[in-house]
Image: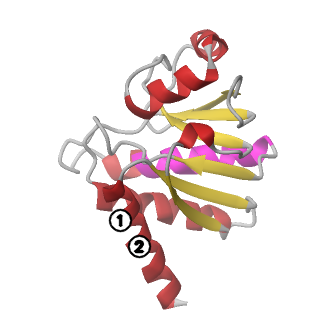
């Protein structure tokens, strides 16, 4: 099942939340900073031990003080006009996060809007890519029980809502 919410990702009672991380996995701004703040110092310490995550890659940690038992950290691409492989990097963020979740027997996962904040990825294009990656994973037989797109802002929520409703109409 794919679900859409608007709210604070850090408060969700799911098996795993996804962090829109930076390459050194350290606390930053936006969703990354909020997750680190809510999880506590243990998360930053574990991330420091992991050390690095490349663009389009994913790493998993414990959730510490979050309701979520796990955090999957993925590094989205910075938008440079769409001519530098940004779409494939972003698709890989979702794909590799979902594969990692499946590998760790995670049943419920919630994603933020990866790369649409300070990385400048156009919100509609990012939503299309995210939904395509999740649909591909869910149709592959490695299905998770529930995938949530958790939008913090109204603009992202509106994009996902329109795209997901369009998919429902096509059925």
Quadrant in the picture for the C terminus: bottom right
Which sits in the foreground, 65 or 86? 65
Mark number, residue 159:
1
| Above/below status of 156 relative to 73 | below
Q: Is residue 17 left or right of residue 23?
A: right
How far apart marks 2 and 1 lie (CA) works out to 6 Å
Image position, residue 61 (x, y; %): 68, 26
Residue 123 among those drawn in magenta: no
Mark number, residue 163:
2
Image position, residue 160 (x, y; %): 42, 65
Crowd rating for badge 2 (residues with CA inside 10 Å; few <14, some 14–19, many 20+): some
Answer yes or no: do the residues labelled 2 and 1 have beta carbons within 8 Å? yes
Residue at 66% across / 70% down in the picture? Answer: 139
Which sits in the foreground, 52 or 71? 71
Range of the magenta residues? 90-104
Mark 2 residue element: helix
Q: Is residue 149 left or right of residue 29?
A: right
Quadrant in the picture for residue 126: bottom left
Residue 96 among those drawn in magenta: yes
Q: What is the basis of the colouring in this image?
A: secondary structure
**Secondary structure predominantly adopted by residues drawn in magenta:** helix
Residue at 46% across / 79% down in the picture? Answer: 165
């Amino acid at each position: 099942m794919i679900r859409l919410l608007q709210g604070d990702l850090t408060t969700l009672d799911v098996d795993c939340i996804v962090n829109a991380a930076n390459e050194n996995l350290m606390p930053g701004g936006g969703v990354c900073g909020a997750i680190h703040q809510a999880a506590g110092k243990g998360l930053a310490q574990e991330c420091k031990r992991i050390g690095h995550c490349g663009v389009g890659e994913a790493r998993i940690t414990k959730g510490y003080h979050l309701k979520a038992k796990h955090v999957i950290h993925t590094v989205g691409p910075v938008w440079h006009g769409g001519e530098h492989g940004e779409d494939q990097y972003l698709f890989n963020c979702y794909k590799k996060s979902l594969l990692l979740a499946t590998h760790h027997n995670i049943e419920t996962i919630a994603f933020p809007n990866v790369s649409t904040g300070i990385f400048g990825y156009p919100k509609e294009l990012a939503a299309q890519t995210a939904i395509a990656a999740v649909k591909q994973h869910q149709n592959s037989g490695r299905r998770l029980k529930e995938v949530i797109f958790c939008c913090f802002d109204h603009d992202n929520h509106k994009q996902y809502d329109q795209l997901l409703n369009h998919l429902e109409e096509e059925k």
